[in-house]
Amino acid sequence: MVWNEFRDFCLTELRVEAIQEWATTKVARGCQVTASHPLWAGVSANVLTDGLPGSYNHTADPGLGSALR
């Protein structure tokens, strides 16, 4: 880690341990998912059922509203 003149810094490496909690009531976890339109940053719709609490996705076109399926 290196401090710069503005007193903020850039981490060059961050290692974390992923803890998988598989006991869940999410019946859709691991199921194949598709989206009717392209998603943000080309991310797969499968992140919606991966069971991880930090996963999310949204459409690349913010104006689709309820047209996204």
Image (tube, rainbow, N blue to C red):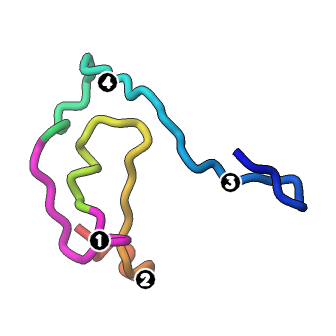
Instruction: Give the image quarter of residue 68.
Output: bottom left
Q: Amino acid at mark 1?
A: Gly
Q: Which mark is residue 20?
A: 4
Residue that appears at 75% across and 49% down: 2
Say which of 58 and 5 sits in front: 5
Q: Secondary structure at mark 3?
A: strand
User: Which stretch appears magenta?
Assistant: 31-43
Q: CA distance from mark 4 to mark 3?
A: 28 Å
| Chain-order first, disc 1 or disc 3 | 3
Q: Which residue is mark 1?
A: 42
| Residue lying furthest left | 32
Q: Which mark is residue 10?
A: 3
Q: Which residue is mark 2?
A: 63
Kindly check if marks 1 and 2 are in contact, taking CB atoms under 8 A apart as contact. no
Q: CA distance from mark 1 to mark 2?
A: 17 Å
| Residue lying furthest top | 23
Q: Amino acid at mark 2?
A: Gly
Say which of 20 and 2 sits in front: 2
Q: Give the vertical position of 25 relative to 41 (above or below).
A: above
| Chain-order first, disc 2 or disc 3 | 3
Say which of 19 and 67 sits in front: 19
Q: Give the vertical position of 33 relative to 41 (above or below).
A: above
Kindly check if marks 2 and 3 are in contact, taking CB atoms under 8 A apart as contact. no
How many residues crowd mark 1 within 10 Å: few (<14), some (14–19), many (20+)?
few
Q: Which mark is residue 5?
A: none
Q: Give the vertical position of 50 relative to 39 (above or below).
A: above
Q: CA distance from mark 2 to mark 3?
A: 34 Å
